Image: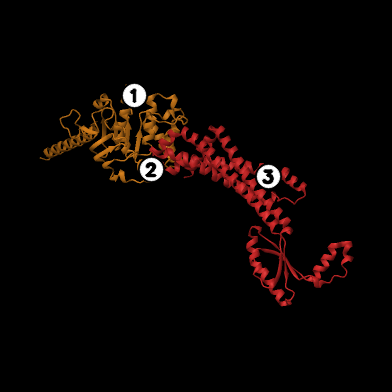
Amino acid sequence: MIVFKNVKKTYPNGTDALNGVDIKIDDGEFVFITGPSGAGKSTMIRLLTCEDVPSEGKLTVDGTNLKRLSRRQIPKYRRKIGVVFQDFRLIPTLNVYDNVAFAMRVVGRGGREIKERVMAVLGIVGLEHKVSVFPEQLSGGEQQRVALARAIVNSPAIIIADEPTGNVDPEMSIEIMKLLSSINRNGITVVVVTHEQRLVRAFKKREIRLRYGKVEFDTAHDHDHDHKEKSSDKKDHHSDKEDHKKKHSHKEDKEDSEHD
Amino acid sequence: MIDSFIFLVKCAVKSIFKNWLLTLASVTVLTICLVTLGSSILLFDNVNLFIDEVGDESQVVIFLDESLTTEQINGIHQQLFQIQNIKNVSYESKEMALQNYLESMGENASLFSDVTSDVLRNSFIFNIKDLSKFDQTMFEVGKIEGISRIRERREVVDRINDISQVILMLAFWIIAIFIVISILVITNTVKVSVYSRRIEINIMKYVGATDAFIQMPYFIEGIIIGILAGILTLFLTYFTYTNILSPIIYDFGLFTPVSFQSRFIPFALFYIVSGALIGMVGSVYPVKKYLNV
């Protein structure tokens, strides 16, 4: 669970990037963070990835107060999160396989485990046939899928995607979002920072809109808003359960009537 | 763990080849530094050897009181033995001194046929081990009772000490300057390497690599540069000293120069370890800058 409690962030030049943000993101949620430039989206990511600490307030991830993490504890925390960037940040000298394997090697994983896991995640993103290809030979969408594979290869609990569709064509944007949704269906919390309202509307997930460093609206709380679903997947899950219950009770009714 | 280590070594080796021109520059400068360092040590060893060989010039003779008994003379002998910085202590009775003197006169010895040993004194002759502690040693010798006079060549000792000091100071500054230059050049090489891999470092940080893990390839790169320079220095020094310098010193006929062969292993270890250490130190700073992510 990610909890921002009255988080404020003021940079040394006096800019108030976040000005008392209160957000709670449950485990397994899919959340869009939107807002205009300068709203504080990047600062939120910087705080979540421990690149920076809040000036005031409390930011906890799975009960860990990020402000209190020592320099030595940060790498351990970061292994819990996978980050996807707008500019992909792939290593140009490594092929697809090695770019993904790299993330496992740097955390000290072994050879066989790396091979199995890398091939598995490349399968998830649909690039298992491009293991030997170098980033420059891939399209923007494919590069972002490699970046996504790298982000999930260490089985993180949270995926943070900073404008993941910013450098890909509209069709591929949908594909990337679908991939993120399928990752989310496996129980991974996904936080997507985007300015593309088209995607937000299309995927009907929880949206937290920032403005001037504050939460302008949060569809989880603002029930009047169009995007009031907290998590469509959760809802789907609930409705599945309800359907199951209904079916079950219908079956019971039927059985009862038969008994009768 | 082994996989990770192999991965780190591969990263370091790749970087060395990728920035080969800078690596070459680093190895060259570090080699110059280590050659200077090794040459200074060899020079110092040879100077010490030379001092030992001219040690007779620093020989000390103490003349004893005429009134001393054999037991008292033995007592002085014991006291001299107890002084740490003294070597080659020998007793010369006045009879022996006369005989030696006459022998040194050769054909003219007959001119002194009337001279008896009574004009001479019993004495002890010894050498000083470490000339830099000459004054301190002579102060201790002076405390022994029963000595009537001491003959020493203080000006020679002072001169030798002065030369040693100058050589030591020169060697120290030359070595210090070269170490600083080597560290700076290696720092620059690693800096270029770090800059070209800043994206990798950034990704490493995001996926949870520890600072130590990120620094490791650059440490290894620095160490490899150091070891290469160490090996190069070893062979350079060996061949120049054994085939050029040593024969020249020998031809001068002053003294037999120290042998490099007998010190090959200590020198090899010294060069390689110093090279690796300088390489490591040079690689610390440039990575630190990019770790603050």
Separation of marks 2 and 3 at Cα, in angstroms: 48 Å
Q: For the residue labelled by badge 3, is the local secondary structure a helix, a strand or a loop?
A: helix
Separation of marks 3 and 1 at Cα, in angstroms: 65 Å
Badge 2, how many Cα within 10 Å: few under 14, some, many 20+?
Answer: many
Separation of marks 1 and 2 at Cα, in angstroms: 32 Å
Q: Which mark is residue A172?
A: 1
Q: In the shown orientation, is residue B152 left or right of residue A26?
A: right
Q: For the residue labelled by badge 1, is the local secondary structure a helix, a strand or a loop?
A: helix
Q: Chain of mark 3?
A: B
- In the rendered image of the structure, the colour used to display chain B is red
Q: Are marks 3 and 1 in contact (CB under 8 Å)?
A: no
Amino acid under label 3?
Tyr
Quadrant (top left/top right/bottom left/bottom right) for the N terminus of chain A: top left
Amino acid under label 1?
Met
Residue A56: x and y in percent read: 26, 41
Amino acid under label 2?
Pro
- In the rendered image of the structure, the colour used to display chain A is orange
Residue B84 shows in this picture: no
Residue that numbered label 2 is attached to: A75
Sequence-wise first label, 1 or 2: 2
Q: Are marks 1 and 2 on the same chain?
A: yes
Residue that numbered label 3 is attached to: B238
Look at discs 1 and 2 and give the one toward the viewer.
2
Quadrant (top left/top right/bottom left/bottom right) for the C terminus of chain A: top left
